[in-house]
Image: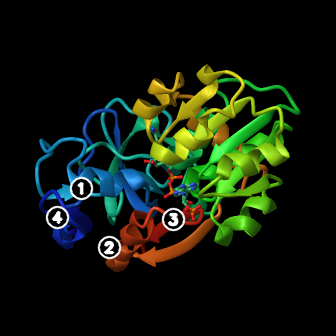
Amino acid sequence: MSKVYVFNDFGSPENQELIDRPAPQPGPGELAVRVRAAAVNPVDYKIRTGRYGRDQSLPAPMGQEISGVVTAVGDGVDGFAIGDEVLGPVVPGYGAFAEDTLVRATDAVAKPAEIAFADAATIPVAGATAYDGTHQIELEPGQKLLILGAGGGVGLMAAQIGKVHQFTVIGIASQAKREIVESTGAMFVLSGENVADRVRQVAPEGVDLILDLVGGDALRQVAGLVTDPARIISAADPDTAGKLGGSALQRTREAMEKITGVIEYNLVDPHVSALYPLDRAGDAIAAVETGHATGKTVIEMN
Ligand SMILES: NC(=O)c1ccc[n+]([C@@H]2O[C@H](COP(=O)([O-])OP(=O)(O)OC[C@H]3O[C@@H](n4cnc5c(N)ncnc54)[C@H](OP(=O)(O)O)[C@@H]3O)[C@@H](O)[C@H]2O)c1
């Protein structure tokens, strides 16, 4: 048997538990992976609340992104073999907070030896989203990228990618994240009331792109700072971004491979700030569910 963390009903975290199941077997085109690390994302608890629908069968395995070692290969798989170290998004329904899971071979990327399993687990969702959010609209060196939610999992990586491209990065976050946001080379601006005035102090002409990782009122407060409303991209709240003239962050297939290379060459640090064992997956999810996580929270398997 193999352990997996699930929720048994939509709603609150009380419905989560660690259960045993037979280790998943790969179908055509799939890899079975012994999970070494899985990163936690806001989407994990959002799915559990039911806000994305309630048609998923229960118990529902939790988690989206993993790194690990291939233990079996399905029919028709090219390019991967048993023993390979990989990272990737899991096949829907199998979960990431698990000892064993499945990844489609076409979604998997070979894990470079230089990247630790914990860091690699942050690449398929958070890393790739940071990559897409900084490439969907290409800025020129010196142009201003405003990141709302700069101290979280996506934000810290996006800030570093922005610096690699020599953008002027302005990161909005709470006071506790000042040091870590500044360590990326970004200018720190304190979140909260009158945040737009504080951004104007460092960018009197406004900004060239807003990458929104928070949404709602926080986005509405800063939206007027962008020179062109079409240059608002949101990973957190596409509806509000759309009403303001912006758009949803679009995910691309190439992002995962590209950001893997960037991390391999030490140009971006995923900032894994908290590690939990699988039997404390609930605490790991709760830490992200506060909405105020720093960097990435990762669950490591034995
Ligand atoms: N569409 C996609 O494919 C995709 C992929 C990944 C993530 N997302 C979404 O993108 C968002 C960010 O993801 P994430 O993984 O980076 O989340 P995260 O790690 O939980 O970070 C969110 C950050 O937002 C900050 N924050 C909260 N309220 C704020 C405010 N009013 N002003 C400024 N910062 C504020 C939090 O810390 P402080 O409050 O302490 O500053 C926290 O660091 C989530 O909504 C997630 O669901 C979408």
Left or right: 14 in relation to 214:
left
Callout 2 secondary element = helix
Q: Which residue is mark 4?
A: 21
Q: What is the C-alpha distance between the residues marked 4 and 2?
A: 18 Å
The location of residue 200, given as percent across then percent down, is 78, 43
Query: Residue under circle 1?
Result: 48
**Quarter of image, res 104:** top left
**Nearer the camera: disc 1 or disc 4:** 1
Q: Residues within 10 Å of mark 4 (few under 14, many from 20)?
A: few
Q: Real-space Cα distance between discs 1 and 3? A: 19 Å
Real-space Cα separation, disc 2 to disc 3, in angstroms: 16 Å
Which is nearer the eye, 60 or 242? 242
Quarter of the rendering occupied by the C terminus: bottom left
In the figure, is residue 196 to the left or right of 17?
right
First in sequence: mark 2 vs mark 1: 1
Note whether ligand 1 is within 8 Å of mark 3: yes
Distance between mark 2 and mark 1 Cα atoms: 12 Å
Distance in Å between CA atoms under marks 1 and 4: 20 Å
Q: Nearer the viewer, residue 216 or 18?
A: 216
In the rendered structure, which disc, 1 or 3, sits on the residue that comes first in sequence?
A: 1
Q: Which mark is residue 292?
A: 3
Q: Please, what secondary structure does the residue beneath circle 3 have?
A: loop
From the viewer's side, name the closer residue of 215 and 150.
215
Locate residue 191: give its quadrant.
bottom right
